Image (cartoon, helix red, strand yellow):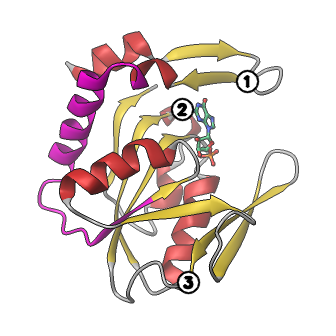
Amino acid sequence: MIQDKLKLEIRDIVDFPKPGIVFKDITPLLKDAALCSEMVDAIIDQLQGIEIDAIAGIESRGFLFGFLLANRLGLPFIPIRKQGKLPFKTVSESYALEYGQATIEIHEDAFEKGSRILVHDDLLATGGTVVAASKLIERLGGEIVAYSFIISLDFLKAKGRLSRFSDNIFSLVSY
Ligand code: 5GP
């Protein structure tokens, strides 16, 4: 089972990026090309029957599998980035962090109105990041048809925050 392989490779880093946080580190997965390919296959299996026009990935770990997935499906990839990184005209959305706030941006011509968008990120924690990304996509006239994550931290109960955009919420492993 791919879940078992992933759980063996994903490592917990205690007190990163600050004391009290246990960070799920996916970098060991990236060394195993065959496993990465298997992961893309498993994500595609989960998405069977969902019509998708483009895949939006969130900086920066959402770019890793988001782009692989888009490329394998022959779909456009849309980067959603932290403020000040995208070179063309952008729309932006701010969201609350535990302390302070963060802002993410998308190019205003990222996709055509009415496009069916899959949102991908490496990990779902509180859901703040993907909710902000979802608002950006809706502001540009996109429809969110599914979410895909490598890891979902289910004990944080973020899926309820996403269901107002789409009920198709997938992850390869959950904790
Ligand atoms: P949320 O906004 O859902 O609280 O946090 C998810 C975002 O923070 C994702 O973009 C994810 O990359 C990052 N993140 C938060 N905690 C972790 C973690 O333990 N491991 C990894 N790889 N990313 C994390």
The residue labelled by disc 1 is 21
Q: Is residue 4 left or right of residue 83?
A: left
Of marks 3 and 2, the one in the foreground = 3
Q: Is residue 133 left or right of residue 86?
A: left
Quarter where residue 41 is shown: top left
Amino acid type indicated by mark 1: Ile
Mark 2 or 1, nearer chain start: 1
Q: Is residue 78 left or right of residue 25?
A: left
Q: Kindly tell me whether mark 1's CB lies below 8 Å from ligand 1.
A: yes
Magenta range:
30-56
Mark 3 or 1, nearer chain start: 1
Quarter where residue 49 is shown: bottom left
Image coordinates of residue 97 in percent, x first then y, are 78, 50
Q: Is residue 48 left or right of residue 17?
A: left
Q: Secondary structure at mark 2?
A: helix
Furthest-top residue in this view: 8
| Distance (Cα) linking label 2 and label 1 | 14 Å
Image coordinates of residue 140 in percent, x first then y, are 50, 85
The residue labelled by disc 2 is 155
| Distance (Cα) linking label 3 and label 2 | 35 Å
Mark 3 or 2, nearer chain start: 3
* Residue under the point 61% across and 65% down: 132
Rendered view: 59 above or below 20: below
Amino acid type indicated by mark 3: Glu
The image quadrant where one finds ligand 1 is top right
Q: Kindly tell me whether mark 3's CB lies below 8 Å from ligand 1.
A: no
Amino acid type indicated by mark 2: Phe
The residue labelled by disc 3 is 108
